[in-house]
Image (cartoon, rainbow, N blue to C red):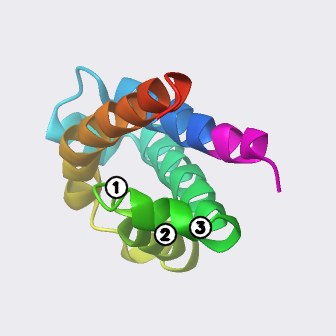
Amino acid sequence: MSSDRLTAYLGQMHAAALQACAFVDGMTRDDFLLDTPTQMAVGMALVLIGESAARIMARYPEFPSEHPEIPWAKMKGMRNFVVHDYYELELPVVLETVRTSLPDLIFQLDNLRNRHAQGE
């Protein structure tokens, strides 16, 4: 497996996190709770993030160990929950996750990409 694939997975995670944040930008909690298309779009973004995390964990197990600041298992767990228990999602928790955890993830992924680009 090439490092190009790893870079692609990280890029997919980054793009999906940015999209999820953009989907809810400017929305109130009530707006989100009433907007089924946005809820579904955010859910799909979380699935994409978790799927990439799961693939990295499976195909590059040393990488998550080297970067424990990123919540790999939590992202994979969220993916599984969205896929298998979608109708049980607590939408306020989903919105809070997008607003608080995803900006942190974006920052962490940016740092990873910058360090990787510099050869660290």
Q: Which residues are magenta?
A: 1-9
**Rendering coords of residue 12 (x, y %):** 62, 39
Say which quarter of the image contains residue 8: top right
Say which quarter of the image contains residue 10: top right
Q: Check disc 3: other Cα within 10 Å, few if <14, some if 14-19, many if 20+.
A: many
Q: Check disc 2: other Cα within 10 Å, few if <14, some if 14-19, many if 20+.
A: many
Q: Residue furthest front?
A: 120
Q: Is residue 88 above or below residue 27?
A: below
Q: The residue under label 1 is which amino acid type?
A: Ile
Callout 1 secondary element? loop
**Rendering coords of residue 49 (x, y %):** 52, 51
Callout 2 secondary element? helix
Q: Which residue is mark 2?
A: 76
Q: The residue under label 3 is which amino acid type?
A: Ala
Q: CA distance from mark 1 to mark 2?
A: 12 Å
Q: CA distance from mark 1 to mark 3?
A: 13 Å
Q: Which residue is mark 1?
A: 70
Q: Which residue is mark 3?
A: 54
Callout 3 secondary element? helix
Say which quarter of the image contains residue 74: bottom left
Q: Is residue 97 above or below residue 107?
A: below
Left or right of 21 in this view: 54: right
Going from the N terminus, do you reach mark 1 or mark 2 first? 1
Q: Count up the numbered dots.
A: 3
Residue at image point 42% right, 36% down: 112
Q: Answer yes or no: do the residues labelled 1 and 2 have beta carbons within 8 Å?
A: no
Observer-side mark, 1 or 2, equals 1
